Image (spheres, rainbow, N blue to C red):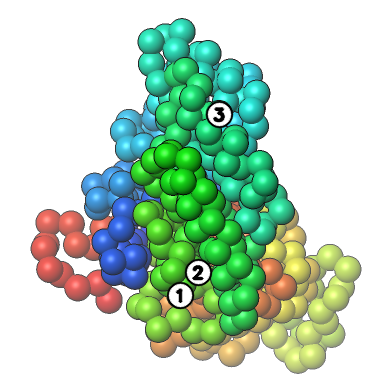
Amino acid sequence: MGEHPTTAEIDLQALDQNLAQAVFCARGRPILGVVKANAYGHGALPLARRLSIRGVQMLGVAFLNEGIELREGGITLPVLLLAGCFREEVAEVFEHRLIPVVYDQSVVEALGRVASSRGGVCPVHVKADTGMGRIGLREKEILSFVERAAATMGIRVEGVLSHFSEADIEDRSSASEQIRRMREIRQGLMDRGIQIPFYHMANSAAVMDLPAAHLDLVRPGLMLYGYSPFEKRSPLALRPILGWFTRISALKRVPAGTPISYGRTFVTQRESLIATVPIGYADGYPRSLSNRGEMIVRGIRVPVVGRVCMDMLMLDVTEVPGLSAHERVTVLGEDGGESIFADELARRSGTIPYEILCGIGRRVARYYRDPGEGTAGSKGG
Ligand SMILES: *Cc1c(COP(=O)(O)O)cnc(C)c1O
């Protein structure tokens, strides 16, 4: 009642299986489960809870407010703020026992003051820019930065991390160069007698296909949600954990020559059965899929016709026999023998699965399923 007709169902058992793949690839190294951006659109808290009870050692979010959300939801695991924090946020970072990624001297000093004034110590992970050109210290500066941070009252340097710019392509030369720089940094710090428990740089692509980057800890995100960052199919048995569903809100038969939706970009070529579904770009269905997307109805793929609107779009369901209004439509997932997943949607709309998943709108209600609950060993279909 009063519930949005477009919903997402998240299969927590599939999440477990994807996590097991990451553990297998990383040969038992600690896992930092990346749950930034509302766990890539899947819902940060339910996923963080599940990953916690399944033995993940740390969680990663991008920003302070995301970390606070986890703490307020009762998550007790170490939580890394991957995008760092601003100076004025350090008190809250410390109070919520969050671990910031740092790369700015003034932030380290402010954190150290807050922590030591309260008789505590704040762990930090220092970011190295080994080739991404985003946040982090370049090789020339990082050794002295870490040395200084390690000597700062109230600060404990628990990790040094870096991030790949292209671990997801065939050509490994730039990734290898980044690994080489990271090893050099590690050697440099060891030579200075600085012991740091966690050096880490492996995102999903590196977890899956670049063992030299596994170091002390790995940071998978996308693969936990069941997708491979690679264009080619992965040999791993990853399973997308999110299904996205809507239902037919109107069904009408129209004659040939009928224009459909804004701008009349589609005109029926024959007598057609047109279904309207209550999902639009406000739900995260890309407008660029106007006249390009497909959905599944009764196990049959049907095309999106006309422009995707904010709250609705139209499907040509002429080929689906015996259809009635209010029937379920699969946007992402499997139905009958057919399946559509976020990588296909991404390809069709010129983006990456990350953006499709993160874009699933706030008004889409998320449901969490645990097919194995109480029936140990039952197999998910
Ligand atoms: C998002 C992110 C990850 C996870 O990347 P995936 O490609 O989703 O595995 C790892 N590390 C950092 C720093 C990130 O920002």
Q: Residue at x 71, y 79 (%)?
A: 292
- Give the residue at mark 3: 148
Q: Is mark 2 within 8 Å of ligand 1?
A: yes
Q: Is residue 164 or residue 235 the one in the foreground?
A: 164
Proximity of marks 1 and 2: CB atoms separated by less than 8 Å = yes
- Give the residue at mark 1: 209
Q: Position of residue 99 (x, y in %)?
A: 45, 33
Marks 1 and 2, how far apart at CA: 6 Å
Callout 1, which amino acid? Asp
Give the left or right position of residue 376, taking residue 108 as reference.
Answer: left
Marks 1 and 3, how far apart at CA: 35 Å
Q: Is mark 3 within 8 Å of ligand 1?
A: no
Q: Is residue 276 or residue 16 the one in the foreground?
A: 16
Q: Residue at x 53, y 40 (%)?
A: 126
- Give the residue at mark 2: 205
Marks 2 and 3, how far apart at CA: 33 Å
Of circles 1 and 3, the one toward us is 3
Q: Quadrant of the C terminus?
A: bottom left
Disc assigned to residue 22: none
Q: Is residue 160 or residue 222 the one in the foreground?
A: 160
Callout 3, which amino acid? Arg
Circle 3 Cα neighbour tier, 10 Å, few/some/many (<14 / 14–19 / ≥20): few
Helix, strand or loop at mark 3: helix
Q: Quadrant of the N terminus?
A: top left
Q: Is residue 298 or residue 186 the one in the foreground?
A: 186
